[in-house]
Amino acid sequence: MAKSARRRMGVEERREQLITVALDLFASRSPEDISIDEIAERAGISRPLVYHYFPGKQSLYEAALRRAADELSARFVEPREGSLGERLLRVMGRFFDFVEDHGPGFSALMRGGPAAVVGGGDVPHATGSARATIDDVRQAAYEQILAHLGVERPSARLALIVRSWVSLAETTALLWLDGRTVARAELETQLVHDFVALAAVGAAADPELADLVRDLLAQEPPDGLFADLLTRLVTLVPAAPEAPAAPEASAASRVPQGPHSSHTPHVSHTPHLPHAPRAPEAPRV
């Protein structure tokens, strides 16, 4: 059966099959824990035949890495429909779908992969290739976020904010995989809040960015994610101290008034007196 399958598959088809098998295995275990023998057995072919299509495990890993990177990059593509908060939340939902489905593989992808321990060929070159693939994913996410903002040429500050947020999403996902101590849905919402918070802090020092943030907030629905964040932040602001009580009225103001007097305390207005004339100077002797 295996020989018959090999005759039916062309070179590209077989390569795609091996990449798919590798990705399926990487979803449950780290790439360095998976052998070529295991990949060959899962694909229904011999170990030497795997090497016919890929020179070594490193080359198969890099091909699988590229496939995973392309899929992850596609998760950031989102139609410009609805508010920015809604769009970012949908992006985060798909992003965490990928993270959850490809846990160990995602960790290997974002941490640069097992190039240093897998061996097989020029390890520094392999590490550089893996890192270039990861950088491509980050760049794709960066460009998609700018597209959602409607910005083609971002200022240095805005570029820094978007790249910082992409890095934050990546780090948050990696930490979540380690223990999953926070509900996934909460993290997705938190990351959307993180984006607008970063933008707002930058806007405080950048008039151009401030105009962009105002426009974005003006397009958000009253019950949207950004409004929800503002509501939560207001509860953190300490309440203003109460005004001090008025000093006690003087004893004179507490004297009972006549039956026809008003309850309003009487205030005596002393008229301004003219200055007394100056005494004439004594004649000089």
Image (tube, rainbow, N blue to C red):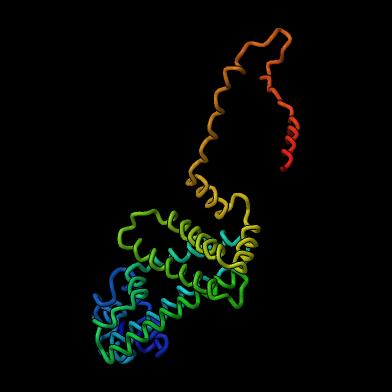
Q: Position of residue 279 (x, y in %)?
A: 73, 35
How many numbered marks appear?
Answer: 0
Q: Quadrant of residue 264?
A: top right
Q: Is residue 90 visible?
A: no
Instruction: Give the residue at x 48% y 63%.
Output: 92
- Image x and y of residue 7, in percent: 36, 89
Q: Position of residue 223 (x, y in %)?
A: 59, 49
Q: Is residue 122 above or below residue 208?
A: below
Q: Which quadrant is home to the N terminus? A: bottom left
138 relative position to 266: left or right: left
Q: Which image quadrant is residue 23 in?
A: bottom left
- Left or right, 26 with respect to 143, comes to left
Question: Please, is residue 163 above or below residue 262 in the view?
Answer: below
Residue extending farthest front = 285
Nearer to us in this view, 160 or 6? 160
Judge by depth and name the residue closer to the eye, 208 or 215.
208
Determine whether, in the image, residue 14 is placed left or right of residue 227.
left
Is residue 198 left or right of 18 when viewed as pictured? right
Q: Which residue is located at x 65 percent, y 59 percent?
A: 219
On the question of residue 251 being in view, the answer is yes
Quadrant holding the C terminus: top right
Residue beneath the point at 39% across and 53% down: 183
Residue 275 to residue 163: above or below: above
Q: For the view shown, which residue lies furthest in the top direction?
A: 259
